[in-house]
Amino acid sequence: MRNVIYSTNISIDGNCDHTSSGPDEELYEYFTHLMQDADLVVYGRKTYELMIPYWPDVAKAQSESKAETEFAETLTALDKLVFSKTLKSAEYNTRIVRENPGDEILKLKQQPGKKILIGSINLGSQLMALGLIDEYFIVIHPVIVGEGKHLLEGITLQEKIKLKLVDAKVFKSGYVGLHYVKQ
């Protein structure tokens, strides 16, 4: 069975808005490495529209730093799935799914392949509530934002999710990457 991985950036006060602080080279390398163990990345519509076409354009133009360009190339090459009821079309190896995210992820978990990455706050929260996330990669940014979207906002868990810390990485910039697996 394939593992479903949720990854996100979060401020010290729990804000998941990625505009609160920008990643550095080391963080791009961290997420690029994470994507190399996957063959599918899954987004909700809002995150998909933030990522595409920006990162494929960076990959094509080779317009950013080496680490950002490698991130862009890795992301662009991956198959993508976007859950949306309103998105009309999708590009760059992307398939749109309009049905229940839980049912689709459960089907994908049972198919052969590498890991499945979830990269959206709302979608990740829904899948957590359904118990479908196997691993968590949370990067804490050394900033207090004071407002914004939080993980599991508006979601009620049916039961506590117990996690085991399997790795922690402190970046030179002060970011802390935490890797947990579901127990």
Image (spheres, rainbow, N blue to C red):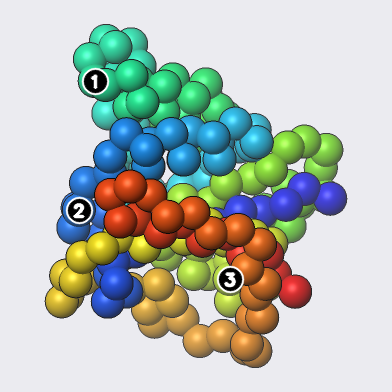
Q: CA distance from mark 1 to mark 3?
A: 34 Å
Q: CA distance from mark 1 to mark 2?
A: 18 Å
Task: Kindly identify which numbered label has been placed on residue 128.
Answer: 3
Seen in the picture, residue 90 relative to 165 is either above or below; the reply is above
Name the spot of residue 29 as percent of width and height, x first. Answer: 43, 34
The spot of residue 42 in percent (x, y) is 53, 45
- Outermost residue toward the left? 146
Which element is circle 2 on?
loop
Image point (64%, 45%), residue name:
116
Badge number at residue 174: none
- Mark 1 surroundings within 10 Å by alpha-carbon count, few (fewer than 14), some (14 through 19), many (20 or more): few
N-term-proximal mark, 1 vs 2? 2
Q: Position of residue 126 (x, y in %)?
A: 53, 69
Question: In this rendering, which labeled residue sits more in front, label 2 or label 3?
Answer: 2
Q: Please name the residue shown 19% across and 71% down the image.
A: 144
Q: Earlier in the sequence, mark 2 or mark 3?
A: 2
Identify the residue position indicated by label 1 in the image.
64
Amino acid type at image mark 3: Met
Labels 1 & 2 near each other (Cβ < 8 A)? no
Task: Give me the disc on residue 21.
Answer: 2
